[in-house]
């Protein structure tokens, strides 16, 4: 089983963002999608959970086409997928425990005692033990990202989507988050999709890397393969040298 995005096209008011984006995300691995700001990384990610529907194309999650499912079936598929939003997206007026336990309330068999146990377990996994009664405003940026990650794993999803998990963090905090992403894969067997423009982070955590450029996958391969690519668009992006990219236009 896997996630397969096939020939996705998506535009907003005449602006074509995705123009034939295809990518297979194999189970049990971590795949990063890199690309410039505004290239459509978050738009791509939202298609996987049916927050956006493509104009054209298919979104297969374990053999079900999210692009065509009715809303109720989309909710069912969504339960398999944890989403770590770009800005953590915690509810400000709720404690960290309430935020992390939110998705569990709707799940069968979860009494408040069981939710509290599970919340403790998840906070422990992201090294936030004892933060239950804090409010999001009382946490640092890196801690908020970790709380967002704890919330995403609480319901034991098979897939986790990470939207810019390290953007805006200092190098040490970035390394902590990268380490957690790798642990989710190794210890929980989670299939990860990481969207980022942080190249070091992408190379560190990924089994495979795909570069989104001009609405399509420009390159797809292992971190070593992308580092060895001679495509000026790829080189220009990973080396931060726009002049290489311009020579192709
Ligand atoms: N819901 C929306 N309505 C209109 N435009 C959108 C919407 N979502 C994204 N866009 C536009 O699509 C483009 C790609 O956005 P996004 O996927 O967020 O880029 P990024 O690669 O930085 O994550 C941007 O120009 C953005 O303004
Ligand atoms: Mg984005």
Image (spheres, rainbow, N blue to C red):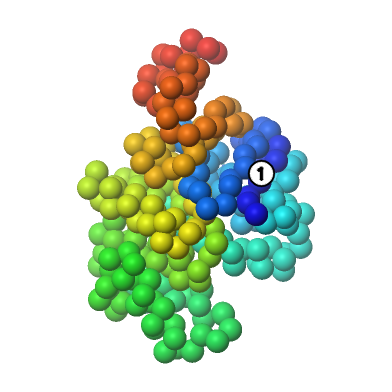
Q: Decide which of 32, 241 is in the foreground and name it.
A: 32
Q: Is residue 197 above or below residue 50?
A: above
The furthest residue to the left: 172
Q: Residues within 10 Å of mark 1 (few under 14, many from 20)?
A: many
- SS for callout 1: strand
Image quadrant assignment for residue 146: bottom left
Residue 247, horizontal then vertical, whole percent:
48, 10
Q: Decide which of 204, 18 is in the foreground and name it.
A: 204
Is residue 223 something one can see in this rendering? yes
Residue 129 horizontal side relative to residue 207, left or right: left
**Ligand 1: does it lie within 8 Å of the C-beta at label 1?**
no
Image quadrant assignment for residue 116: bottom left
Residue 93, horizontal then vertical, whole percent:
37, 74
Residue 179 horizontal side relative to residue 46, left or right: left
| x 69%, y 49%: residue | 59
Q: Is residue 11 above or below residue 136?
A: above
Residue bearing the label numbered 1:
5
Residue 17, horizontal then vertical, whole percent:
61, 35
Quadrant where the image shows the N terminus: bottom right
């Amino acid at each position: 089983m896997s996630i397969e995005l096939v020939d996705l096209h998506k535009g907003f008011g005449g602006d074509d963002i995705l123009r034939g984006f295809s990518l297979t995300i194999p189970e049990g691995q971590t795949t990063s999608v890199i690309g410039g700001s505004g290239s459509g990384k978050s738009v791509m990610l939202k298609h996987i959970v049916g927050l956006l529907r493509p104009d054209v194309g298919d979104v297969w999650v374990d053999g079900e086409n999210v692009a065509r499912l009715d809303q109720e079936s989309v909710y069912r598929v969504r339960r398999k997928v944890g989403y770590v939003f770009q800005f953590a997206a915690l509810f400000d007026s709720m404690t960290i425990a309430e935020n992390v336990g939110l998705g569990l309330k709707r799940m069968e068999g979860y009494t408040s005692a069981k939710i509290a146990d599970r919340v403790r377990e998840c906070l422990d996994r992201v090294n936030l033990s004892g933060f239950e009664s804090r409010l999001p405003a009382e946490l640092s940026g890196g801690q908020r990202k970790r709380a967002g990650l704890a919330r995403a794993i609480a319901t034991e999803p098979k897939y986790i989507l990470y939207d810019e998990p390290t953007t805006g963090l200092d190098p040490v905090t970035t390394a902590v988050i990268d380490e957690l992403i790798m642990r989710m894969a190794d210890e929980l067997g989670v299939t990860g999709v990481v969207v980022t423009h942080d190249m070091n982070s992408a190379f560190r955590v990924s089994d495979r890397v795909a570069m989104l450029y001009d609405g399509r996958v420009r390159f797809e391969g292992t971190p070593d393969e992308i580092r060895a690519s001679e495509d000026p668009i790829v080189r220009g992006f990973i080396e931060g040298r726009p002049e290489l990219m311009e020579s192709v236009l």
